[in-house]
Image (cartoon, grey):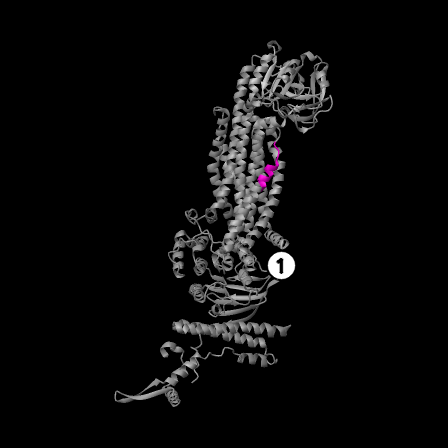
Amino acid sequence: MTDPILEARGLAKTYSSGGVDVLALRGVDVALAPGEFVAVMGPSGCGKSTLLSLLGGMGRPTAGEVLLAGVRVDQLSETRLALLRRRSIGYVFQFFNLVPTLTVAENVELPVLLAGGSRGQARARREELLALVGIERRDAASPAQLSGGEQQRVAIARALAHRPAVLLADEPTGNLDSASARQVVDVLRHGRGEGQALLLVTHDARVAAAADRVLTMRDGLMVDETRVTPPREVPSLLELEV
Amino acid sequence: MTQRLGGLLPPLNAGQIYTTLQRLERDGLVSSEAVPEDGRNKRMYAITEAGRCELERWASTPVPGTRLKDEFFMKLVLVGLGGLVDPKRLIDAQRREYLQSLRDLTEVVRGEGSEILGLLADGAAFRLEADLRWLDLCERRLVQKEER
Amino acid sequence: MLVTFLRIALAGIRGRALAALLTALLAAVTAAVLTLALGLRSVADEPWDRTFRETNGAHLIALGGPEVARLARLPGVVEAAPPVPGSFTSFALAGQRFALNALATGPEPPRVERPAVTSGRWLTAADEIVLEQSFAAALGIRPGDAVDAAASSGRIRLRVVGVAAIASGAPYPDHQPGIGFVARDALVAIQPDSERWIWSQAVRLSEPARADELAGRARQSFRPESRVVVESWFERRSEAGDRSRTTTIVLTAYSALLLVAGVLVLVNLVGGRAVTRHREIGLLKAVGFTPRLVALLFLVEQLLLGLAGAGAGVAGGAVLLPLVAGDSAALLASTPATVTGAHVALSIAAVCTLMAVATVLPTIRGARLGVVHALAAGRSRRSAGAASRSIPLGRPLPLTLGLKEALGRSSRTLIAALALTVTVAALVAGLTFETTTRNEANIDAGALAAISRPGDRAAPGAADQLAPGHPDPIAVPGMSARLRPIVHSLNAVLVLIAAINLLAIVVLTVRERTRDLAVLKAIGLTPAQLGRSVHAAQTVAVAAASALGIPLGLALFLGVYAIVNGDTDRTAIPPWWALAATPLLLAAAVWAITLAPARRASQLDVTTALSRE
């Protein structure tokens, strides 16, 4: 296996809420190879979203380490982490979370500009991505004018905009019907050819089944790993009693 | 039939079809007559009134919904909880199988692109999802209880 | 049921402690400002008439020998006090001599033209004196001080035990000499020769409107050689009106500014709450609350906050009013401004009514939505306006993001800009006032120097021979200079209001924006950039306030000055650098106010921010 692009070792996180310590993660190891698609499943509260936010540098682990391209990043300053995110990480949230005061186009251009791209580059990239996600001629619309599925696709376009090495997605299909969900997963895999790795948290087994590996979490621990292979044979779905 | 269900039908052989039709004619559900064509006799089958009634009865009888027959459950309870094999290993293996089946289904639907077929595959996928959830339940109720 | 209801309302308040605190604070500020504005307005509103009423002022006064008592027998007189004897004297203070008209009203204040004690007490002993208010204020004398009045036997020490207002012609120093009330024994000590006393007889008439006519008839009834002077209340009122006009105009202008500032705080308060609580409405409806009950619950919640805040605010306003308006009452020689029950009721009612309307309307609208819809509508669905779109997203990113944000939330930015504009206008007006005061002083000093050069030899020691009514040029500051403390303290109040309002706006905005800021952080904005974008959003308000406030302030001052003086010849515009410094100072102040919320924004935790509703 190639060297992992993103790796977590013995990751643990304790939240204290109301004087009670809650163990969200209790020592998790994950490795994500370039181009790989890994899905994390588990019941709500099992720590999968916490894992994702720690991997995305949006929280500090209580113990353990996070390595991006072999470099330890969990102890970096907030500013360094932000710089890291704008270069290497794309994040898709469950509730779209587009910036309401920016237009659809500006939402997608923002990461390119942040990563140091010119306005021309940002525009070209935005046109390419919005065409990819099937939202065209809506550039000047504000996010509120779009449906939930459309907003999510714009959010994915935004996450892909700066060609991050790692794409992290938290329940990206949580609010969508199954047809939209399939589209979303297809779009998320768009960057696979460029070696973009995808880590997706979901409780939708059908979305997870599209991954190369499915990890199952329970109570802050990784409890199972399934390597899903391309289809074995065309199975017989009808058994006629003759 | 082949047109509607496409590649998902198991391959049918002609002999099997004729045996079935003869059996139906014997029971008076279909009738047949010989029609000469291209110098050979071709047998044309038509459905009888009794056959139509029987077909209607068959179609309108609901398919039983409860399914207590579950092979995996037998394995889990008899062997897994009996202590011969680690039940968690059984559950994990089964989960992998279900996930893989789900993946296979997805690819099939994508390959065929037929709406009728998609519906069938979606149904199967929903059942697989339910199976996966049920596996989680088995794990929580049976395995974790044992660990405590 | 009621108890449960109140408990739910209180739980609602506790659940959003910061928002509730902010609401109560804004309600308090609004109520305080309204109380202050109403109080100021009442000081400026007919100060002389008010004092005249409260002191049972005389419609006619006759001054002269003992024969003035005959005025009391004039037909049409309904009430008369015994004639009051008095004598002119003087006393020294801080190296200067001041003339004093000592009136021997005695231990029992007269029924007509009865001085109203505004601080300290009325006199009880022969070595005590009560000074007229504008006189005491101009000289800086307070109860507890003492004056050594010139007397026949050298000096007599009089302890100042109180200060009292009276509806005299004009406030000191426009009306000289200053007035003091003493016991008969003290008068005797000052001027033992009762032949030289000046008597005054005050009467009230059944038909006050005919005072001028009766005054003419009274003058005829006295022999011309008796040199009796009869004054009607109309003459005194118009003299007082001329003298207090500047003060009343300035106070009226400020009470209007305060009202505007108060309304802006209120709008902000109401706007902050109008962030409709759709989600909460949905939850309440889901457990069986009817729309009307939901509205009632929110109303009770708001009114609890509003009443608590407004109550505290009115109390604060009442404490603040004498500090701000105390000088003005003295300047007007009127009874002091007080917080009346009507003011309190009006302030509290205004705050609570607007809060109630602002709560009930959106709540009812929200409560009409279906449960599911309401729950889903909890998420913000704001769209970027045209103004926001006109700014292209570019570098520096924090600046353009902040500007777009400010223009996207145009109503809140507008309130911030207006609040700042009022303050800038007041400050610029204050600055121009200051420059003009100096200019006037220079002009006067030049004129004075030209006049007093030939009279130099008369200057030292001449004070002892001060004649009654002779103005003391050095002791009389110009009107502008006397108004200075009032203008500056009112400016300070306006600055304070704007600061609180702005702070509330920034805190509310950052709270509302938490989710957006978290998303920006997730995309890769550094903490410093997040902070800068919050600061940048305020620059719109600062720029607008500077552009509008500076010309507005100049116009305000020149307008008021023109109304007061009839022309603007003696005004002086502040130097350009002082005007240019105003927006810079404003920007710095706004930056400082935004510091804490911006810091909060930059340190926000993405995960918790996004998981919060």
Near-viewer residue (A10 or C590): C590
Near-viewer residue (C137 or C355): C355
Q: What's drawn in magenta, residue-wise?
A: C337-348
Q: Is residue C13 above or below residue C51?
A: below
Q: What residue does disc 1 label?
A: A16
Provide the major secondary structure of the magenta segment: helix
Question: Is C65 on the left-hand or right-hand side of C581?
Answer: right
**Secondary structure state at the residue bearing disc 1:** strand
Single out the residue that lies furthest toward the left: B39
Residue C35 at x, y percent in the picture: 58, 37
Q: Residue placed at 58% from the left, 40% from the top?
A: C347
Residue C592 seen in this snapshot: no
Q: Is residue C98 magenta?
A: no
Residue C505 at x, y percent in the picture: 53, 45
Q: Splitting the image into 4 quarters, where does residue A111 fall? A: bottom left
**Which quadrant is home to the N terminus of chain C?**
bottom right
Residue C80 at x, y percent in the picture: 65, 21
Q: Residues within 10 Å of mark 1 (few under 14, many from 20)?
A: few
Q: Splitting the image into 4 quarters, where does residue A28 fall? A: bottom right
Near-viewer residue (C250 or B56): B56
Question: Is C329 on the left-hand or right-hand side of C536?
Answer: right
Residue C413 at x, y percent in the picture: 49, 44
User: Which residue type does callout 1 highlight?
Assistant: Ser
**Which quadrant is home to the C terminus of chain C?**
bottom right
Q: Is residue C341 magenta?
A: yes
Q: Is residue B113 above or below residue C555?
A: below
Single out the residue that lies furthest toward the top: C225
Near-viewer residue (C467 or C303): C303
